[in-house]
């Protein structure tokens, strides 16, 4: 009985060493692949130069890139109150989407990049609105007497 127990322990130990060798080998190969890819990613990223994308002295900020990285939604006070603007990623093509006397802010993209959600006080208190990226079909989503705001990225149709 003692011989079988020792044999069983030896087999278990040998199996665990074999398993650990395969696992460590796979981990080492995965680490090599990751190390090879990191310099490529770093080479593509360049933060050497800051570029001003807007020129108005009252361009508030809060920029968010579209999911595809081609456009930026941002808030600006250049028209006397907070408005939601959109522009190309290089700063060209700036368009006021909300163009409303109320304050509009906290804009965020939908995951498909087709709509923008934002906060506005155009109905007397702060509510969450949605609109197409051309500014059309602005709809109050919350329509609630209490303060609603700070929307973030959302998913439609799931």
Image: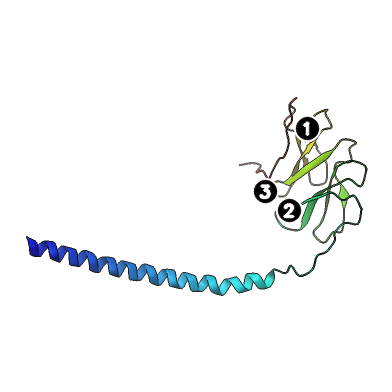
Quadrant in which the C terminus appears: top right
Q: Is residue 91 above or below residue 151?
A: below
What percent of the width, then of the height, locates residue 17? 28, 69
Q: Are marks 3 and 2 in contact (CB under 8 Å)?
A: no
- Give the mark, 3 or 2, whose residue is nearer the N terminus: 2
Q: Are marks 2 and 1 in contact (CB under 8 Å)?
A: no
**Nearer to us in this view, 89 or 158:** 89
For image coordinates 28% across by 65% down, the residue present is 16
Per the model, the C-alpha gap separating discs 1 and 3 is: 23 Å
Structural crowding at the residue carrying mark 2, measured as other residues with C-alpha within 10 Å and reported as few (<14), some (14–19) or many (≥20): many
- Give the mark, 1 or 3, whose residue is nearer the N terminus: 3
Query: What SS does tag 1 mark?
Result: loop
What percent of the width, then of the height, locates residue 112? 69, 49
Q: Is residue 46 above or below residue 127?
A: below
Quadrant in which the N terminus appears: bottom left
Name the residue tied to disc 3.
111
Name the residue tied to disc 2.
66
19 relative to 151 in the view: left or right: left
What percent of the width, then of the height, locates residue 152? 69, 43
Per the model, the C-alpha gap separating discs 2 and 1 is: 24 Å
């Amino acid at each position: 009985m003692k011989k079988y127990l020792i044999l069983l322990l030896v087999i278990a130990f040998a199996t665990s060493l074999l398993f650990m060798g395969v696992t460590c080998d796979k981990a080492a190969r995965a680490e090599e692949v990751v190390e090879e890819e990191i310099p490529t990613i770093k080479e593509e990223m360049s933060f050497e130069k800051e570029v001003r994308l807007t020129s108005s002295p009252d361009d508030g900020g809060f920029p968010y890139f579209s999911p595809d990285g081609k456009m930026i939604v941002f808030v600006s006070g250049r028209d006397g109150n907070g408005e939601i603007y959109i522009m190309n990623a290089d700063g060209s093509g700036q368009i006021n989407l909300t163009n409303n006397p109320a304050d509009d802010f906290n804009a965020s993209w939908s995951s498909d990049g087709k709509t923008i959600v934002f906060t506005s006080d155009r109905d007397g208190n702060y509510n969450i609105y949605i609109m197409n990226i051309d500014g059309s079909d602005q709809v109050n989503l919350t329509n609630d007497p209490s303060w609603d705001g700070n929307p973030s990225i959302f998913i439609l149709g799931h």
